[in-house]
Image (cartoon, rainbow, N blue to C red):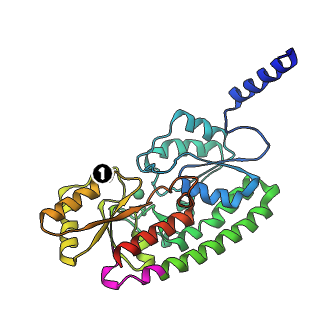
Amino acid sequence: MNRRAILATLLVSLAAAGCGEQRADDGRPLVVTTTGLVGWLAGEIAGEHARVVSLMGPGVDPHLYKASEGDVRRFEDADLILYNGLHLEGKMSGILEKMGRRRRVVALGDSLPPELLRALPGGEQLHDPHIWFDVSLWARTVPIVQRALAAADPAHAEAYREAAGRVADELADLDIWVSERIASIPERQRVLITAHDAFSYFGDRYGMEVQGLQGMSTVAEAGLQDMDRLLALITTRGIGAIFVESSVPRRAIESVQAACASRGHTVAIGGELFSDAMGAADSPDGTYPGMVRHNVNTIVEALR
Ligand SMILES: [Zn+2]
């Protein structure tokens, strides 16, 4: 290597060390999201005009996730931070609040009209955070993301508006598809039993009775009462399949299966659903529409 080549290599590595891998400063705004679900939305609407980084990958439980030092650095580099809100990212509320004092931070769920949200027992201010399970409700967050991107990067406001229109159309079609698929399950069998209470918006929108072993957050462990309640439902209704969630350890739902067996009722594991995280990034399940289709097809195959 001649001296010039050595100097160039040195400069490149210094730049890389100083900026971190996310701040390859190409002039585009950096959008940092918590969940992959929010990241998908941001990526679709931003297109090539912004870089989108999601902190939580496949299989990561947002209720339990704590920000690492690297995550804090990414937040500090961000031009826009988008997160689900409604206390989904319960262990990140401190850092997100702190970031909100100095930069543009938007919580999608908290930006929706409260009358569209499911109120939780124990306080009028508490709402179910799993808003992406009702595709029509998730579609309501599209203009929120669009406006946040346009405010962070006014030069591409028109591109964000056009892309948001395309995403809204795609989600409207997806919503109809889900309704039709779920309606193909005989009404008596439309009971969805999963590891935690994530699917209530899904049940409300598409007409399924929904029960989770754990409560709304995975922070609290399931108790004996939860187990008894589920066993009674499964055995009296003759339910044939229950479901594992990709972001919750499968032993919880397997213990329900074992308890049913000890009472002489055979219940199958109907498959794995993506609840609070999407599938692998390079697979169809790594997109929001792909995740929804996977879940719906898995539910319909197991219960019909
Ligand atoms: Zn959840």
Q: Is residue 60 above or below residue 200?
A: above
Residue 121 at x, y percent in the picture? 33, 65
Total marks shown come to 1
Magenta highlight on residue 189: yes
- Mark 1 closeness class: few <14, some 14–19, many ≥20 residues within 10 Å: few
Residue found at the far top of this picture: 3
Mark 1 is on which residue type? Ala
User: From which residue to which does the magenta span run?
Assistant: 181-191
- Residue closest to the eye, 186 or 207: 186
* Quarter of the render that holds ligand 1: bottom left
Magenta highlight on residue 185: yes
Indicate the quadrant containing the C terminus: top left, top right, bottom left or bottom right. bottom left
User: Which quarter of the picture shows residue 26?
Assistant: top right
Residue 72 at x, y percent in the picture? 57, 37
27 left or right of 56?
right
Residue found at the far left of this picture: 263
11 left or right of 258?
right
71 left or right of 157?
left
- Residue closest to the eye, 44 or 283: 283
Residue 202 at x, y percent in the picture? 43, 72
User: Which quarter of the picture shows residue 40?
Assistant: bottom right
Residue at the spot x=48%, y=55% of the render? 277
> Would you name the residue on which mark 1 appears?
220
Q: Judging from the image, what secondary structure is the residue with disc 1 in?
A: loop
Residue at the spot x=47%, y=67% of the render? 133
Residue at the spot x=67%, y=39% of the render? 22
Residue found at the far front of this picture: 1
128 left or right of 162?
left
Residue 62 at x, y percent in the picture? 45, 50
- Residue closest to the eye, 254 or 195: 254
